[in-house]
Image: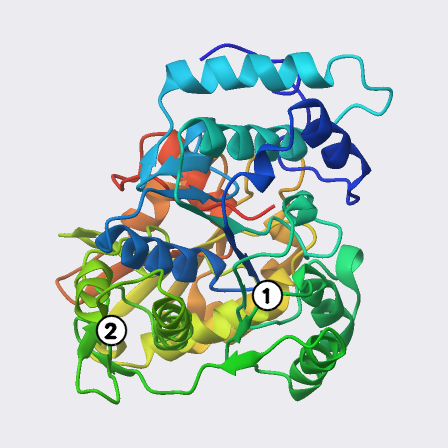
Amino acid sequence: MKENWWVGQERFGMRLGLERIQALMERLGHPERAYPVIHVAGTNGKGSVAAMVTEALMASGLRVGLNISPDLGKINERVMINREPLSEDLWDAYGEEVEEAGRDMSDVPTFFEAVTALAFLAFQRQAVDVAVIEVGLGGRLDATNVVPSPLLAIITPVALDHMDRLGSTPAAIASEKAGILKPGTELVLAQQPFPEAREVIMKRAKALSIPVFEAAPRARMTAAGPVLTTDGGLRVSVPLQGVYQRANLDTAWMAIERLAARGWISHLNRAAAGLARVTWPGRFQVVSENPLIVVDGAHNLHGIDGLRATLEQDPWRKTRWHLLFGWLSDKPGQEMLQRLLPKVTDVVLTRVPGDRGIDPGVVLSEIPHQYRPVVAEPLQTAWHRVLARIDGPKDGVLVAGSLSLLMHLNQAGLLPYSSPIRVER
C-alpha cells in the first residue's frame, strides 16, 4: 500500500479532541452522516461485542462496515466490510482523498484521526447499510465520536485503564465513556464491575432522556464457549473461549434484541446462526494444540482477572502453564503478574518492542524463585526460551500482558494465528 503523510506519525499515539476530525469530515463532505452507526465504547470487550453484533447484522442480509483499532500490522485490517478488510487498492484510493483533505490543515490530524476519516469515507463509498464503530480511547473526545446520534450506543464493562488520559477512578473513566451518548439514541449497558461507573452512565443517560437496556447475566460457560437461552427458547452460542465472553455475549445479545425490535434484524434465529460463526483472535485463543499455546491480550487488571478465572476452569486448570509475559509502560505490570502467578508454573519476562515497552527486570526480584523467573530479550529469544520449558503433554505456553506483545510475536512469524488481532494503544 502507498505511504500517506499520516502513516509516518506515531501509530499508537493519540491526541484527544474533536476539532481536527470535525475539520476533516467537513472537507470530505461529512461521510459519517451517510449511514446509521452502532457506537461501541468501554474498557474491555469492545471488539468481541462489535464482532458479534456485526455477524448478527450480516446474517440479516445487511452490508456492514466494521471499524476497529489498532491492527495486527496491516493497516487495512482496521476497516472491514462484512468482516473482510478493505482492499489495498481501495485503501490507497481513499487514503489519497484523506491526504488531500488534510494536507494544508494548520493542526495536522493524528494517525488515528486520519484512519478514522478513511473508515467513514470507505463506508460511504461502499454503501454500507450500517456501520459498527469501536471507540479508540475513552469516548467523549475520541475521534469516532464525530458521528451524529448513533442508532445504538453500547458500553461494555468500564474498568481502570488509560488512567493518565481518562481519570484515576471508575467514575471519571465512565464519564468519558458516557460521552458517546447523544439525544435520540438508545443505550445497551453491560454488567458493570464498579457500581459507581454504572451510576455515572445511568445519570448521563437520564439527563439526555436516553432509554437504557441493561444486559442481564444469562449466559453460561461450556467447553465450546458461552451459551445463553432466550426467553423464547432460542439457544445462542459463540465459539469463543474465555470466561469473560459470557458477559460479552449477554451484552451483544441485548443489543441484537434491540436492533430486532427496531427492524434492523429480521430473524433472531438467523442472528444466532451468525454468532455461531464469530471469530475474534487474541482473546484466550488456542493457536497451537501440540504443543499447547494459548494467547490472551489481557492488559489491565480487569482483563487479567478474567484470564485468571478462565485458567481455573476445566480443561485449563490441569495444565502446567509456562508464562511469557510483557507489558507496556502505562500498565500495572507488576500487579497483573502477581495476580497470574498462582495459576502458572514458571515465568519468562520479556520487553515488548517499541518505545512503550518496559524493562521487565524491574519486577524480577519480586517473583518467588519457585517460578524460575528469567528475563529474555529479544523477543525471538524469549519465545524459544519459554517453548524449551515444555516437558510433557500436560504442559502449555501462555502469552499474556499486552496485545502489543501478541502483535510483535505475530509480525515476527512466531504465532500462526489469523487476522485481525487487536492491539491496545
Who is closer to the viewer here, 7 or 230?
Answer: 230
What percent of the width, then of the height, locates residue 282? Answer: 37, 52
Helix, strand or loop at mark 2: helix
Q: Residues within 10 Å of mark 1 (few under 14, many from 20)?
A: many
Residue plotted at (42% across, 56% down): 50
Q: Label 2 sits on what residue type?
A: Trp
Q: Label 1 sits on what residue type?
A: Thr
Instruction: Tell me: residue 126, above or below residue 65.
Output: above
- Find residue 142 and name its label: none
Residue behind mark 2: 316
Residue plotted at (70% across, 58% down): 162
Helix, strand or loop at mark 1: loop
What percent of the width, then of the height, locates residue 58? Answer: 27, 50
Distance between the alpha carbons at the discs numbered 2 and 1 = 41 Å
Q: Quadrant of the C terminus?
A: top right
What percent of the width, then of the height, locates residue 251? Answer: 42, 73
Task: Tell me if residue 110 can be seen.
Answer: no
- Find residue 185 and name its label: 1
Residue plotted at (32% across, 30% down): 413
Residue at the front extreme? 263
What percent of the width, then of the height, locates residue 305? Answer: 49, 75
Instruction: Tell me: residue 283, above or below residue 307.
Output: above
